[in-house]
């Protein structure tokens, strides 16, 4: 969107004859009045990425990936985060066992792959920057959680099954000897059709996701020249003031609900 779509929001709540104590709230001194600007220059490209497996906030360069890739149509992202295989805490014997899940060359498991999971937004998120006493906000388009991918374990299991595969004749003989209990589940025709459609839909989506090729991404961490240049677009360049047609009380009510005190 163009700079002309930047919006300036300035408002002072002035409810004559009412005070915070009227609503059972403590009186708070106003220490500053800050003009607020909303810009949409990066609104369609700004994603919030969460790391639920990290208990603390992620610091710059802490999760710097060696490889980043994306499936543009489905929006799936993967990051390969290097592991410190020289650390005293790293079990190289176990790392070599699990390394067959990423390579057949005896390579250690030296990366941790994070894969994105899109999370439906239950509310609106905005990114904010305070500069020169002004607050600049940009709406966030998508919320994503990055979780460890365990596909390498599937590959390890597949190779172990292939290595210890039992002869088909022995399997058939064992099946004939063993008594088997079969559980029969009866579904209505409508339920079967609904289940079939659901499975086909899920399978179709998964198939299309798997078929889409990965595209390589360039990753620029906080503090890099590229990151700084993009961050500058979070600052609104238009200072045109927005004419608000809603009263401050109505605006707050639309956000947080009624401020009327509870009546017992």
Image (spheres, grey):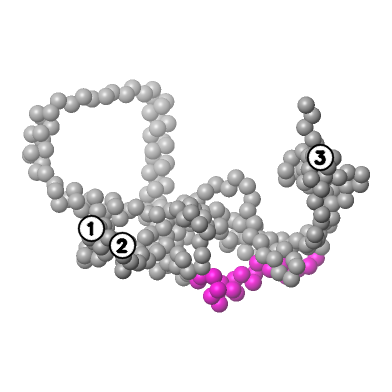
Distance from the alpha carbon under mark 2 to that under mark 3 = 57 Å
Q: Which residue is mark 2?
A: 90
Q: Is residue 156 left or right of residue 260?
A: left
- First to last magenta residue range: 220-240
Q: Is residue 227 highlighted in magenta?
A: yes
**Number of residues whose C-alpha sits closer than 10 Å to that of mark 1, classed few (under 14), some (14–19) or many (20 or more):** some
Residue 15 is situated, as x and y percent measured from the top left of the image, at 88, 47
Label 1 or label 2, whichever comes before in sequence order: 2
Q: Which residue is mark 1?
A: 97
Q: Is residue 113 left or right of residue 2?
A: left
Q: Which residue is mark 3?
A: 23
- Closer to the camera, 35 or 92? 92
Distance from the alpha carbon under mark 1 to that under mark 2 = 13 Å
Q: Residue at x 77, y 32 (%)?
A: 262
Quadrant the N terminus occupies:
bottom right
- Closer to the camera, 189 or 24? 24
């Amino acid at each position: 969107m163009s700079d002309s779509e930047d919006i300036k929001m300035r408002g002072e709540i002035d409810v004559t004859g009412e005070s915070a104590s009227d609503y059972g709230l403590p009186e708070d001194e106003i220490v500053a009045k800050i003009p607020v600007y909303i810009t949409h220059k990066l609104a369609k490209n700004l994603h919030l990425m969460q790391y639920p497996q990290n208990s603390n906030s992620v610091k710059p360069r802490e999760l710097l990936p060696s490889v980043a890739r994306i499936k543009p149509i489905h929006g799936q992202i993967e990051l390969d985060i290097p592991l410190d295989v020289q650390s005293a805490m790293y079990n190289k014997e176990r790392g070599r066992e699990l390394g067959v899940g990423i390579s057949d060359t005896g390579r250690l498991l030296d990366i941790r792959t994070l894969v994105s999971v899109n999370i439906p937004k239950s509310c609106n998120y905005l990114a904010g920057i305070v500069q020169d006493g002004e607050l600049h906000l940009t709406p966030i388009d998508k919320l994503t959680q990055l979780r460890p991918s365990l596909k390498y374990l599937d590959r390890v299991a597949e190779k172990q099954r292939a290595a210890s595969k039992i002869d088909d004749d022995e399997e058939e003989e064992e099946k004939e000897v063993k008594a088997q209990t079969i559980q029969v589940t009866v579904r209505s025709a409508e339920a079967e059709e609904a289940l079939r459609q659901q499975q086909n839909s899920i399978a179709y989506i998964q198939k299309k996701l798997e078929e889409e090729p990965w595209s390589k991404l360039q990753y620029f961490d906080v503090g890099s020249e590229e990151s700084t240049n993009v961050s500058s677009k979070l600052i609104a360049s238009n200072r045109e003031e927005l004419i608000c047609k809603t009263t401050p009380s109505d605006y707050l009510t639309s956000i947080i609900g009624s401020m009327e005190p509870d009546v017992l």
